[in-house]
Amino acid sequence: MPYREADSQEIRTASTTNEIKGGIKMSSSIYQNKVNSLSKEIQRLEAKRADFSKQIAAKKKSAVTLSSSLRNAKGSSLTSKLNQINKLENDAANLEGKRAEVEKQISRKQVDLNNANTSLQKELAKEAKKQQEEVQKSQKRIQDNYNKQIRKLQQELTSKVAAQTKLISQNEMIKQDDIQYDVFISHASEDKETFVKPFVDELKKLDIVVWYDNDTIKWGDSIRKKIDEGLRNSRFGIVVISNDFIRKYWTNHELDGLFNLEESGVSRILPIWHNITKAEVVRFSPSLGAKMALSTAVMTPEEIAIQVKEILK
């Protein structure tokens, strides 16, 4: 898929998925809040129970200490100590009663927490299933729309090819037997090693007949004449657009020839962006920037060659 269309498809899919997530009412939050609230309440009650246990232990310890001193006590001192022991034991009993009540509350809250956790898990499972169903529906809608657009583009392409064939026949501008090359490679010499040469090698592996200056222009040949012959006798013109391409005289001459042939319905320009941004292409040629292009930033020479083979079919 051409690189700009692939990016657009990915953005549309991600955007739709985010809309689905935002649109599903997350009722599980109600159960989650309840779980959080019960957990905090149980923690509070456990801290209260621990405090009661601490107080009970202190009371009993004091009572034991006083009991051990009774053998040496007499008269009012003995009575006072007995009263103190009695009070400590009563206080400890009261605290144990309160602790027992807190333990009952903890038990009840624990049951409520278990129930809330069970409800939360069920609701999360339901919401996950619903979200998955919505995503699948959305993806199907996107795929259906994408297939519809592809069919439309294929129909438009078929119509354009038919119109082009009719125009060629009517004007007798070129005969099928005159076409010697499948593609004409227009490029800057600075881009040969980084992309063009490996790309041409991949095209040849696929039995694509290529007009390539290194193969075609020999010592002593007229460069302009050879280029014009190549442009005239090629089905497609592949333009490797880079900053070096923009600055070159011969590449601009080739591009002018390709545009003239395209307007006459003889050939078609296939742009490839190489180490250049869309803004730079548009500044150089708005009409060229508006064409669907492949990019060496996201595709290998082999992958682009395969795309050329598909077009030639």
Image (spheres, rainbow, N blue to C red):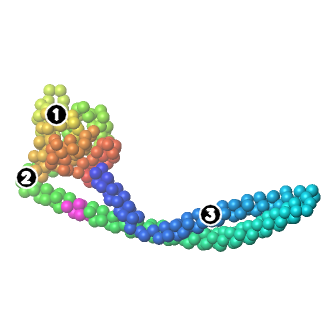
Mark 1 neighbour class, 10 Å CA radius: few under 14, some 14 to 19, many 20 or more: few
Residue 44 circle label? 3
Disc marking residue 248? 1
Q: Which image quadrant: the C terminus?
A: bottom left
Distance of label 1 from label 3 (alpha carbons): 80 Å
Q: Earlier in the sequence, mark 1 or mark 3?
A: 3
- What residue is drawn where x is 30% and y is 65%? 145
Give the image location of residue 75, x and y in percent.
Answer: 91, 62
Q: Which residue lies furthest to the top in this view?
A: 220
Could you tell me which secondary element the residue under label 2 belongs to? Answer: loop
The magenta region covers 151-156
- Is residue 152 covered in magenta? yes
How many marks overall? 3
Distance between the alpha carbons at the discs numbered 2 and 1: 33 Å
| Residue of label 2 | 172
In screen coordinates, is 266 left or right of 66? left
Amino acid on which the number 1 mark rests in the picture: Lys
The answer to whether 81 appears left or right of 118 in the picture is: right
Q: Where is residue 74 in the image (x, y as percent from the top left)?
A: 92, 60
Of 248 and 193, the residue lying toward us: 248
- Label 3 vs label 2: CA separation? 94 Å
Using a 10 Å C-alpha cutoff, classify the residue at mark 3 as few (fewer than 14 neighbours), some (14 to 19) or many (20 or more): few
Report if residue 25 is visible in the image.
yes
Tell me: residue 267, above or below residue 37: above
